Image (tube, rainbow, N blue to C red):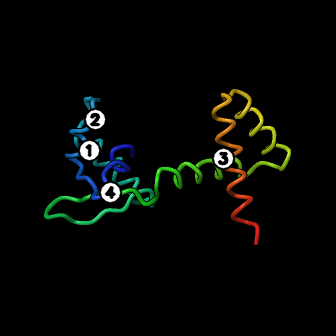
Amino acid sequence: MEQLWDRPDGLSVREVLDGLDSGLAYTTVMTVLDRLAKKGVVSRERDGRAWRYRPSASRGEQTAQVLRDALGGLSATGRRDAMLHFLGDSSPDELADLRAALAQLEQNQTP
C-alpha cells in the first residue's frame, strides 16, 4: 500500500514487485493485489495486458477506517479504555497533534 499511496498514477504488479525488497514471487504480489481489489481496498484498470492498481482511499482515510473497525464493536467504556491504552504511550508531540486535531474538529462543527 505504501507504494500505491506514493504513486497516484497507479502501479502494475511488476512495478510493485520491483519496489519491494522481499524476494516475493510475482504471482504472490499479483494474488495479494487481486484480493485487495476484490475487497475494495484498491481499484484496478487495464493498461494493455496488465492491470494498474491504485488505492481506493488515502493513507489517512484507510487508517481511520481500520481504527473505526477495531473500535466499532466495543462498548463506550471499551472504546474509552482502548483509546486510553493507545494514547498512554504517546509523546508530548503526539498529544499536541491530537489536541490540535480535536480543536480543528470542534471549530469545523461550530455553526
Task: Find the residue positioned furthest to the bottom.
Answer: 111
Residue type at mark 1: give it.
Val
Q: Residues within 10 Å of mark 3 (few under 14, many from 20)?
A: few
Task: Find the residue positioned furthest to the right.
Answer: 77
Residue type at mark 3: give it.
Ala
| Label 3 SS | helix
Number of the label disc, if any, that sits on residue 8: 4
Cα–Cα span, label 3 and label 1: 28 Å
Tally of numbered discs: 4
Cα–Cα span, label 3 and label 2: 28 Å
Cα–Cα span, label 4 and label 1: 13 Å
Residue type at mark 2: give it.
Leu
Ranked by sequence position, the earlier of labels 3 and 2 is: 2
User: Which residue position holds label 1?
Assistant: 16
Contact (Cβ within 8 Å) of mark 4 with mark 2: no
Q: Residue at x 31, y 62 (%)?
A: 44
Contact (Cβ within 8 Å) of mark 3 with mark 1: no
| Label 2 SS | loop
Residue type at mark 4: give it.
Pro
User: Which residue position holds label 3?
Assistant: 70
The x, y position of residue 46, in whole percent, is 22, 66
* Mark 4 or mark 1, whichever is nearer to me: 4
Ranked by sequence position, the earlier of labels 4 and 1 is: 4
The x, y position of residue 78, in whole percent, is 81, 43
User: Which residue position holds label 2?
Assistant: 20
Q: Residue at x 63, y 32 (%)?
A: 93
Residue 40 placement: quadrant: bottom left
Number of the label disc, if any, that sits on residue 48: none
In this rendering, would 32 be left or right of 41? Answer: left
Q: Residue at x 46, y 58 (%)?
A: 57
Contact (Cβ within 8 Å) of mark 1 with mark 2: yes
